[in-house]
Image: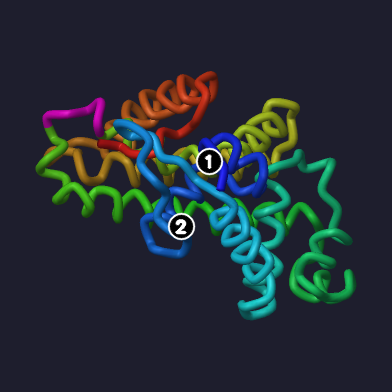
Amino acid sequence: MSGLSLSELVERSGVPASTIHYYRRTGLIPEPSRQSGNRFVYDERHVEALRAIRSHACTDQPVRARIVACAIEAFKTRSYAEVSVSEIADAAGMAKGNVYRYFDSKEELLTASVETLLEDTRRRFEAALDSVGGVDGLRDDPEKSALMLGYVLADVLPMLLELGARAAKGHEPSADLARKVLRTLADTAGQPFAAEGQDPVTVGLGVIESAFATVMTWAIGPDWPPDNLQ
């Protein structure tokens, strides 16, 4: 079987790199072969496994969660204007009218998608901290803290950028949601590192700034994020 780089696997499967890493760490896809250092080689088994996971992601959940899961998959890869409620309904295996039983509009569905990803990001960041022995091992290593948050944020960055673009154009609901997202992310990033009396949001904003710079560096590289944080 011919080997695939991470970027080739992303292109073949349509699954973001950080989601692939998550599936690998949780055992949902086979372990890849190590090429060198922190780089791994994937193959057709991984393509098939990722496609199978995506095909079931929108059908093996309660109805509302299924709709949101399919919306997230759509909004992650295309702009708000390019995504239709009809295609989300098709992916969820239901009629368009059923989507509107749970969501009044595509706007409301985008909000639900962002809020779901926000909660997932919080859990994943906490899990990432636990994986390195907790916050104590990172208090004196802000670069590693930013790296870990960037690793988690890479998967949701397209949606966050879309939200920011809509807010910049004067769309007030998007601006309100963008403020909520930024404050929640800052609080999530800052809580573990804020000393007594410090505002976690202020501390977290510094971590987020470094994390986004890290993600932008990955974005212009051959594979992003890297296969391993070590």
Residue at position x 10%, y 43% from top? 136
Residue kind at label 2, given as amino acid type = Tyr
* Within-10-Å neighbours for mark 1: few <14, some 14–19, many 20+: some
> Residue 52 sits in which quadrant?
bottom right
Check disc 1 and give the amino acid type.
Answer: Gly
Residue indicated by mark 2: 23
Q: Residue visible at 49% across and 38% down?
A: 154
Region of the chain picked out in magenta, as a range = 140-144
Please tell me which of labels 1 and 2 falls first in the chain. 1
Percent x, y of residue 74: 73, 51
Above or below — where is 56 with respect to 33?
below
The residue to which callout 1 is attached is 3
Residue 228 spot, x, y in % from top left: 33, 39
Outermost front residue: 1
Element under disc 1? loop
Q: Nearer the viewer, residue 230 or 87?
A: 230
